[in-house]
Image (tube, rainbow, N blue to C red):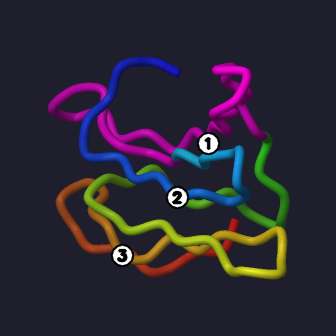
């Protein structure tokens, strides 16, 4: 992934960490999603499924839902306003 700040990450398995969003500059919020394997040290860019991709955001929270293949993004900021939650 590109360098970024104000992103969030969560473990989705014993080996995999999910990273979403953040900012790559003062006015460049991101909505990309990556999976990092902590054993192989490899990154994989993920294509998000669903009707609509979550909007680019930063200063959000990300958590996985145990027993599912889902993660939820809470809050965050985009274009200087607060955002809703999205499941990815």
Residue 6: image location, x then y, percent: 25, 46
Of labels 1 and 2, earlier in sequence is 2
Residue 52: image location, x then y, percent: 73, 63
Q: Residue at x 36, y 75 (%)?
A: 75
Q: Residue at x 25, y 36 (%)?
A: 5
In magenta segment, residue 21: yes
In magenta segment, residue 23: yes
Element type at mark 3: loop
Element type at mark 1: strand
Comparing 75 with 63, the one in front is 63
Comparing 31 with 65, the one in front is 65
Report crowding for label 2: few under 14, some 14 to 19, many 20 or more residues within 10 A (C-alpha).
some
Magenta range is: 20-46
Please give the residue where the numbered disc 3 appears in the rendered image.
75
Of labels 3 and 2, earlier in sequence is 2
Of labels 1 and 3, earlier in sequence is 1
Please give the residue where the numbered disc 1 appears in the rendered image.
33
With 31 as the anchor, is 74 left or right in this view?
Answer: left
Q: CA distance from mark 1 to mark 2?
A: 12 Å
Q: Are marks 3 and 2 in contact (CB under 8 Å)?
A: no
């Amino acid at each position: 992934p590109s360098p970024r700040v104000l992103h969030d990450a969560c473990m989705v398995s014993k080996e995999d960490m999910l990273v979403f969003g953040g900012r790559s500059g003062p006015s460049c919020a991101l909505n990309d999603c990556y999976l990092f394997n902590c054993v192989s040290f490899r990154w994989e860019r993920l294509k998000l499924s669903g009707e609509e991709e979550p909007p680019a955001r930063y200063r959000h929270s990300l958590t996985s839902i145990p027993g599912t293949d889902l993660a939820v993004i809470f809050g965050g900021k985009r274009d200087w306003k607060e955002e809703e939650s999205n499941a990815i």
